[in-house]
Amino acid sequence: MWSNFERSMVRRGFYHCPIQGRNRLRQSVALVQNGHGMAIDSELRLAREGGTPARTGPERPMFPGGMEVGDEELAALERVIRSRNLFRYYGVGDGPQEVSAFEEELAAFMGSAHALCVNAGSSALICGLIGAGVGRGDEVIVPAYTWNATANAVLATGALPVLADVDDSLTIDPEDVERKLTPRTRALLSVHMRGNAANMRPLVDLASERGLALVEDVCQAAGASFEGRRLGTFGDVGAFSLQFNKIITTGEGGAMITDRRDVYETAIEVHDCAGPVRFGGQPPSFPGWNFRASELTGAVARVQLTRLDGLLERMRANHARLAAAVEQLPGLTLRRSNDVAGDAGVALIAYAETAALAADAADALRAEGVPAVQMYSPDVVDMHFYPFWRPVLDALTAAGMPAPECPRTLDLVGRAVHVDVPPQLDERDVEEYELALRKVALGVLV
């Protein structure tokens, strides 16, 4: 017979053991009833305290598109190599024109009028910011939690990044954005961090009301959506990265999308010092950099783009399973999603009550074989967090601006436990992740 305690634990979802059945459940229950320190044979004993690690499967690196690279990418590269046309604008005879084809396919996939393929996500941001009119003397509001390349791109335009707090979605807080506006604000830069869409509706409204440019950094959320619409299409510009640990990859690379012809034409000048001439136009008016993408990049990008929806489907399914498990556990609160269905599903992020508990939980999860981290610690250099953005802080000091203070951001990321959710996780992997999360929640957080 089941005890009332066992029934309550099943109803609350703490134990989902269809294979091992009631015996495994009762071993787990015994540990909970008798206290965490009691030396008993139970699958809920933490690995770092002598228990069996939850994970037995192989490592699943978090390189979604990178782990899918295979014969199709090889064939695309061979097509370019055999043509001997590695440069997008000229070569031997009529080349395959892979970069142009990728730009057309990306624009159609995302639902934008124009796309420009470049050599990095940073380059896409720089092209987009300058294309949208950002320049010396301007301010651009940027979230205090993003990869430092976002803020560095603002510096590259001659403008200054003004840092705003993130909210519990770990994307820029529209209310703090409004507080940070000044007469020098020229643009808002929203970042869709770790696959989660920023709350675009108030940002779109604010940009429209104040006559500001709106740039979207979609580098960590390619293909994700908000209210049924692909990210990168809400603002004046969307910037994407194709670097190796992004959702789709060419090893290194990037792309910019826009519906504005003027932004696109300026971006062509920014990304290529002879850009307009190559398109049959007049000499450029902007002293552009050479951010061009090669035909090799374009060829691989075309293949990877065909993989994107499949990668998203798998990551979303894995994320949904793990999120449902966390919702039933004590001591953890899921990061809020601004659009659950549109989230890319690349990461499971949950908050512990304190930073110390987050660090302890992450340590315990790693001992179980799950690659987890406490997102932020002041003792660990990580360029996602503004206290480590020395060029940005120096630029603000030189401009006579006060040091940025974003306490809510540091509190949230300090309490956040982060687990990657690769699309390559199989059913057994997900079950083992679920078990590890249960063990740590009950062994560390209660």
Image (cartoon, rainbow, N blue to C red):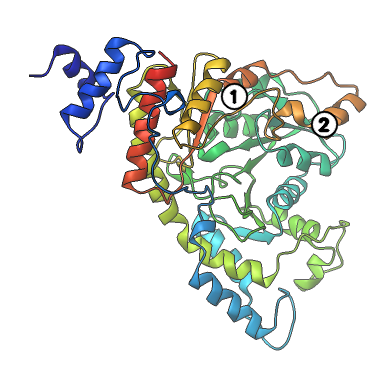
Q: Amino acid at mark 2?
A: Arg
> Residue 24 occupies which quadrant of the picture?
top left
Residue drawn at 40 percent across, 18 percent down: 443
Q: Name the residue rendered at 65%, 30% in the picture.
A: 145
- The tag on residue 204 is none
Residue 16: percent from the left, percent from the top? 24, 31
Q: With 39 as the anchor, is 348 left or right in this view?
A: right
Q: Quick check: 14 left or right of 226?
A: left
Q: Is residue 104 left or right of residue 155?
A: left
Dot 1: what SS? helix
Measured in 3D between alpha carbons, the distance from the residue under mark 1 to the one under mark 2, in whole angstroms, is: 19 Å
* Residue 220 image point, x, y percent: 58, 44
Q: Few, some or many C-alpha atoms within 10 Å of disc 2 (few <14, some 14-19, many ≥20)?
A: few
Q: Quadrant of the C terminus?
A: top left
Q: Nearer the viewer, residue 65 or 291?
A: 65
For the residues labelled 1 and 2, say whether their Cβ atoms are less than 8 Å apart. Answer: no
